[in-house]
Amino acid sequence: MVKKWKIALLLTTVVAMLSGCFGEKPVIDELGKDGKGKVKVVYYDEEGFYREYGNLFNVKYPDIEFEIVSMQEMYRELQGKENVDYEEERLKFLDKHKPDVLMVDLQEMEKLVQEGKLYNLDAIIAQEKFDLEGYMPGLVDMIREHGGGSLYGLAPSFFTSAIYYNAELFREHNIEPPRNKMTWQEMLDLSSRFASVGSGENQVYGYYNRYGGGPQQMFFDVANSSTLRLFDAKGEKFVFNTDGWKQIVKLTTDAIRNKAVYTEPMDEGDNHSFSTDDDFFFKGRAAMVLEDTWFISQIQSRAMWDKEAKPIDWGMVSVPVDPASPDESSYASLSEVYAIAADSPNKRAAWEFVKFLNGPEMAKAASRTMGSKLPTRNQFMKEIDGKSTEAFYSLRPKAKYESMWGGPDVKVPSEFYGDFRTILDKELRAVIDNKKTVDEAVAAIQAEGEAALQKGRQAEKARKEAEQKAKGESEKAEEDNTTEGSGSAEAGTSEGE
């Protein structure tokens, strides 16, 4: 028995040695000896592609050529058209041009996976031991979630937001600064401690909604971190008269009424727009704002052109979280997932490109500049202006995030969105002005919102019927012209004979 076990062990060792000597068969055929290859890539525009990725890649792989399919072509074709479904049009555009490497968002990736149009990267990643551990926590899980458990794409960058705060204001008024992983309730409670600081034109606010939008925008900001939905699972019914929505209405309206939050003045109506001359954060009249990563460049450059702006001792913490999932963020998103077409004849060259732009080299290069995007590999960008980047990387992106409007299966008429915002703003203002209770306002939003949904559906139905009719008439006219032309041709032939 022992002898058989030793023989088996010896055979296993020999096989392992041979595998090491000769190597396992590549999952994807290697590039030719000359290293040449060609990759067709979809990107926003050709110049931007080479500036962002292409030039750096060609330094390492000078013999791989690119053919860039510019998204600008699609946008030009859609210019002037109304009620465009951009996701559907993007998928049509991809199908038309058949690129080797596709730049998609998660929803588009999921749809393409279901249709069998993307190449599963798991095998090549395992064979080449491509590092997935260097990505921010939760990122790979989020992509896998949209790929049915498999990895069909990789993302070199992501978008997110943070709470930026004026540290000097907090010190001056002996108020503890914000911290990572606060809920909206905790953040607005902290914000309310500034309500008694100053008055009139010298009033200091704890939280500032910089771009206006009125109470409704503050409402949407708070709702964004929750799991509440405005429609049922099938998208058939509007659902607002619930305890969860009442709680957000109360939290939002209390904060605005009690001067914990500054949003647009009540008497400026819906036409109020953001003005850089009216920026309370840079004038020292607001302690906190919710902004994306681009805001850092505004902090750095503001004093160069705004004479009233003062240098700010600033800090940042993570966005407010849902107490039910305090380690996750609803603000982290991917708009650029790079995938390989399942039927691509250039898979090896395509993989070399996807691997490169998602590898450590590109992440390190991206960490040297600050823009609207952040590298998804978090080992390089540890600080910005001496401030820790923990605010951006401490929360996991939600694996399967759905907004309050519902998932891709919920089809809401385009007319509904504007109507709902008008209804919501009117009722929130009524609560802030103590003209209605929260219960009364929520009941009104439920009734008027459902009516707006049905109205939108009827308008959408009428529009589709009109489009169908116009299409039928156009096809008939074309058919008549063809028949008439054919008749004329026959008549001409007879005369000739």
Image (tube, rainbow, N blue to C red):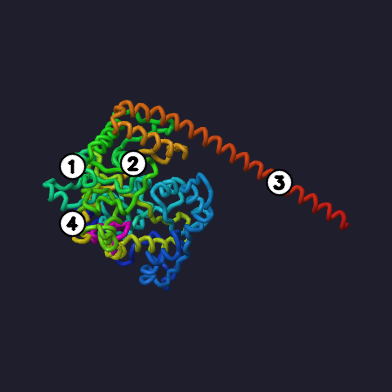
Task: Give the number of the disc on residue 331.
Answer: none
Q: Residue at x 40, y 46 (%)?
A: 107
Q: Position of residue 373 (x, y in %)?
A: 32, 57
Dot 3 or dot 2: first in sequence order is 2
Q: Amino acid at mark 3?
A: Glu
**From the image, which quarter does the C terminus lie in?**
bottom right
Tell me the tag on residue 214. Answer: 2
Residue hosting label 1: 190
10 Å neighbourhood of mark 3: few (<14), some, or many (≥20)? few
* The magenta segment: 369-382
Residue at mark 3 to residue at mark 2: CA–CA distance: 53 Å
What label sits on residue 313 in the rendered view? 4
Give the tally of numbered discs.
Answer: 4
Q: Nearer the viewer, residue 218 or 19?
A: 218
Q: Residues within 10 Å of mark 2 (few under 14, many from 20)?
A: many
Q: Position of residue 161 (x, y in %)?
A: 28, 50
Element marked by disc 1: helix
User: Residue at (29%, 38%) from the top-left corner?
Assistant: 226
